[in-house]
Each structure stands twice: as C-alpha cells, then as structure tokens.
Amino acid sequence: MQFWKPLAVLALAGATMPAFAADCATEIDANDQMQFSKSSIEVPASCKQFKLTLKHTGKFPKAAMGHNWVLTTTTDYAGVAKDGMAASLETDFLKAGDTRVVAHTKVIGGGESDTVSFDVAKLTAPEYTFFCSFPGHAMMMKGSLKLVK
Ligand code: CO
C-alpha cells in the first residue's frame, strides 16, 4: 500500500488547512503585444486584503509600451480610461486624485514589476473591470474582476 501513502499525507494536509487559506494574491503579466495574461480575476470574499502583482515580461520602455493595472467599477471604467488618456505618465495615466479608482499599480516598462494591495471590503459594486490606462491600451488590455464567496 506504499503507493497510497503520499496521497494520504496530502489529504491530511488538506484536511488540517483552515478555511482562511484562500489565495489572497495573484499575478498578472503584461507584454510587448499589449496583452494581459488574464481576462478575469476572482477575489475570495474571505480575504481581508488582496494583493496583485503586475509583471511586464516585454522589453520596451514604459514611455513606448508602458502598462499599469487599474481597477474600477465596470460603470466607472470608460470615464476613468478617457480621463487617463488626457493625463500623463507622471500620474500613471490617471487623473490626479481620481476617487473612482479602487486600486492601481504604477506604469511599468519591460522587465519591471509593481504590486498593489487593496481592502476587499471596498468591493461592494456588482461588477469590476481592470485595465491598462496607457493611452490606446484599454481596448485590448481589459478584464473583469469579481468577488467570490
Ligand atoms: Co498597457
């Protein structure tokens, strides 16, 4: 019965793992082809904070192919993206002090990464959209984020 031993150990480890072991962090990659590696993100409602790490796996500098990760309600998304286009790299292509932004990383270039954490209690709207606010990117670099029980 040697074969079953590792499985039994795994099962035991699983059984003793408490309920708060939900994954309260995720990573998303962005590349030189103007793409995110994920189109949806699920945030467990049991998390207090959720941590997102954005990694730019490309080579282009941020002035040419910069990416950030911006979270808004799906209702606010278009307005925030539009105002972001009129903003500059210095403010991460977001209108300064935009209270519609739930969370955002800074704009990064190839080889860089940035992490943002936010209170899961903030997620009270029915639908959230994440996107890159670099001018012209949001059409391709966009996804949905939802709270899951
Ligand atoms: Co981008």
Image (cartoon, rainbow, N blue to C red):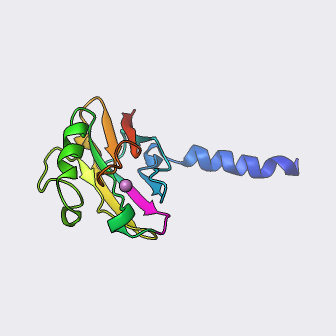
Q: Residue furthest top?
A: 126
Which SS does the magenta portion mostly show? Answer: strand
Q: Nearer the viewer, residue 93 or 49?
A: 93
Q: Position of residue 48 (x, y in %)?
A: 31, 48
* Quadrant of the frame with the C terminus: top left
- In the image, ligand 1 is in what quadrant? bottom left
Question: Residue 56: within the magenta?
Answer: yes
Q: Determine the residue positioned at 17% across, 44% down.
A: 100
Q: Residue furthest right?
A: 1
Q: Is residue 70 above or below residue 58?
A: above
Q: Determine the residue positioned at 31% across, 31% down.
A: 127
Q: Determine the residue positioned at 41% across, 59% down.
A: 54
Question: Residue 94: within the magenta?
Answer: no
In the rendered structure, the answer to whether residue 48 lies left or right of residue 31 reads left
Q: Determine the residue positioned at 21% across, 44% down.
A: 82
Q: Nearer the viewer, residue 44 or 139?
A: 139
Numbered-mark total: 0
Instruction: Classify residue 15 by image quadrant.
Output: top right
Task: Please report the bounds of the magenta region as a residue range.
Answer: 52-59
In the rendered structure, the answer to whether residue 145 lies left or right of residue 123 reads right
Q: Position of residue 142 (x, y in %)?
A: 38, 42
Q: Position of residue 22 (x, y in %)?
A: 45, 46
Q: Position of residue 28 (x, y in %)?
A: 46, 54
In the rendered structure, the answer to whether residue 82 lies left or right of residue 6 reads left
Q: Nearer the viewer, residue 13 or 123?
A: 123
